[in-house]
Image (cartoon, rainbow, N blue to C red):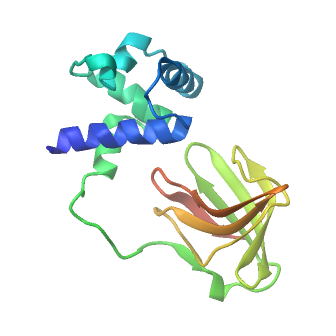
Amino acid sequence: MDTDQTHLQTLKRLVCEATGCEALTPGDFYSIMAFVEGRTHEVIGLTTIKRLWQYGGMQSSPRRATLNVLARAIGYRNYGDFCEHYADTDSASDPVLGEGVKVSDLGLGDHLELRWNPGRDILVEYLGNSTFRVLHSEASKLAVGDTFQAAFFAVGHPAMLANVIHGESSWPLYEIGQHGGLTLVRRI
């Protein structure tokens, strides 16, 4: 599969993950259309979306403007930025570089601010034993009072949270910053 097709398939997969649909039924395409419009305030037609996902054998080469809108819907500036982020498809692993905070460097009661796109922001307190409590949450599924465990937070990389307690629910794993990683890790 060439790079352009790899990027297109990745973009479609991430849009489906963000909408929670599989792009298999007509209702799924309505969900994608509504998600994109809600996130970008731009409309991609239902037929265009179906063609892009090759629903019912429909095929076409998507316009760059359509790809830009889809990329913006999942937190990128445009399709070029999206492709740049996913440019190194040959590398299966990389060292974590850049600004970050190791949990082993924190003391009880220390606060961290974590940000990621699009517009997500949480303030957490370190409770010890690799455990954090959310003190403030903006545009995130994580809510005030939720707890989770983590070992490291690094700018430019997603963070994997374990044993999340969210109200009456619990999630074994929860990833934040999936699209582009954390944009801010600040000790307060």
Q: Which residue is drawn at 32% across and 17% down?
A: 56
Instruction: Please identify the quadrant where the C terminus is shown.
Output: bottom right
Closer-to-camera residue (110/56)? 56
Quadrant assignment, res 59: top left
In this rendering, the count of numbered labels is 0
Q: Position of residue 158 (x, y in %)?
A: 51, 61
Q: Position of residue 168 (x, y in %)?
A: 85, 55
Q: Is residue 174 left or right of residue 97?
A: right
Closer-to-camera residue (165/80)? 165
Residue 25 lies, with reference to residue 79, above or below; the image says above
Q: Which residue is drawn at 64% across and 61% down?
A: 114
Quadrant assignment, res 115: bottom right
Closer-to-camera residue (46/185)? 46
- Asked if residue 45 can be seen in this view, the reply is no
Q: Position of residue 156 (x, y in %)?
A: 46, 62
Furthest residue toward left: 2
Q: Which residue is drawn at 56% across and 21% down?
A: 34
Q: Is residue 88 left or right of residue 160?
A: left
- Asked if residue 44 can be seen in this view, the reply is yes
Q: In this view, does 186 lie to the left or right of 55?
A: right
Q: Which residue is drawn at 57% across and 66% down?
A: 160
Q: In this view, does 43 lie to the left or right of 51?
A: right
Closer-to-camera residue (186/132)? 132
Instruction: Please identify the quadrant where the N terminus is shown.
Output: top left
